[in-house]
Image: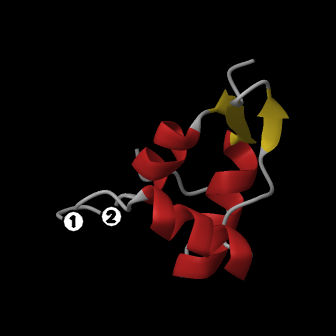
Amino acid sequence: MNDIITLDGVKELWTLPGKRPPSTTTIWHYRRQGRVPQPIKAGRDNLYRRSEVVRLRNRHLGLPPETDMQ
């Protein structure tokens, strides 16, 4: 269950140092571009696999796959 995060967790992972966190609209824009994985619907919540979010973010930013900016 540690690998499952909410939309707020996705925003936190996509926040670059020294920048404001992306908005929900930006995250959905990233979703349509393939930068954020398809969410898992659980009731009204959208849940994401943290490892997939990190992998796609690192691919987009050109970082090694195992890099975690937290």
Q: From this viewpoint, is residue 64 visible?
A: no
The residue lying at 36 percent from left, 58 percent from top is 15
Query: Of 3 and 35, which appears nearest the observer?
Result: 35
Q: Which label belongs to residue 16?
A: 2
Residue 26 higher or lower than 45, as above or below:
below
The 10 Å Cα crowd at callout 2, few under 14, some 14 to 19, many 20 or more, is: few
Q: Amino acid at mark 1?
A: Lys
Pointer 1 residue: 19
- Residue 22 location, x and y as percent? 37, 62
Residue 51 in view (yes/no) = yes
The quarter of the picture where the C terminus appears is top left
Question: Between 45 and 37, which is closer to the camera in this rendering?
Answer: 45
Seen at 75% across and 52% down, the residue is 52
Badge 1 element: loop
Q: Is residue 18 left or right of residue 29?
A: left
Mark 1: few/some/many CA within 10 Å (<14, 14-19, 20+): few
The amino acid sitting under disc 2 is Leu
For the residues labelled 2 and 1, say whether their Cβ atoms are less than 8 Å apart: yes
Circle 2: element type: loop
Tell me the quarter of the image containing the N terminus.
Answer: top right
Q: Give the colour scheme shown.
A: secondary structure
Task: Count the numbered circles shown.
Answer: 2
Residue 27, label in figure? none
**Residue 27: horizontal and vertical position, in percent?**
54, 63
